Image (cartoon, rainbow, N blue to C red):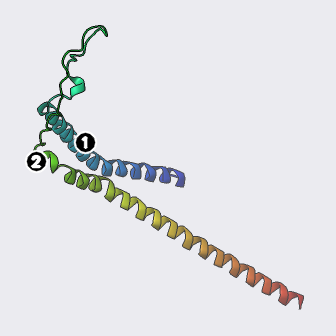
Amino acid sequence: MSASEWIGLAAVVVFAALVLLLAVPLRKLGRYLDEAAATLRWTREQQPAPVADRPSTAPRVADEPAGPVRSTVAEPVDVPPPHVVAEPAPLGTVVSATLGGPLIKVASLGYGVRTAARIRQESRARATAGRRGSSARRTSRRAA
């Protein structure tokens, strides 16, 4: 196998490992989002319908008398169940666990690659400068 084939094989292995590493957190996030959707659905069923969604009793024709004017007070909003109030904290934990860990790993990998590239470039520059200096010394010795 040639070097390019080895590099291609390594790229495939790295991609497969990345897919496997991301599969577990994404699956956990999907489960959590399903649970959050079910909780919201349950909460919506427990709450009365908003005023705009109720059947309208407004007159259909502008010529009809409006009827007696009543003062309406907003309906009290039921307090959501305690588990709905407590849900944002675990959501933050799940999001930070699923996105934070891999994001930190990617950032540290990028830092390591940049550092290695900088060190390699500096060492090449020193080697090139060293070669130029020795060839310049040889030229000056021959001229003398």
What numbered label is drawn on residue 30?
A: 1
> Residue 105 falls in which quadrant of the image?
bottom left
The residue identified by callout 2 is 82
> Looking at the image, which is closer to me, 6 or 20?
20
Q: Amino acid at mark 1?
A: Gly
Q: Residue at x 46, y 62 (%)?
A: 110
Q: Is residue 91 placed above or below 129 in the rendered structure?
A: above
Q: Position of residue 2 (x, y in %)?
A: 53, 53
Q: Amino acid at mark 2?
A: Pro
Classify residue 27 as left or right of residue 120: left
Nearest-to-viewer mark from 1 and 2:
2
The C terminus - image quarter: bottom right
- How far apart are the alpha carbons under marks 1 and 2? 23 Å
Q: Position of residue 71 (x, y in %)?
A: 18, 28
Q: Residue furthest bottom?
A: 144
Q: Secondary structure at mark 1?
A: helix
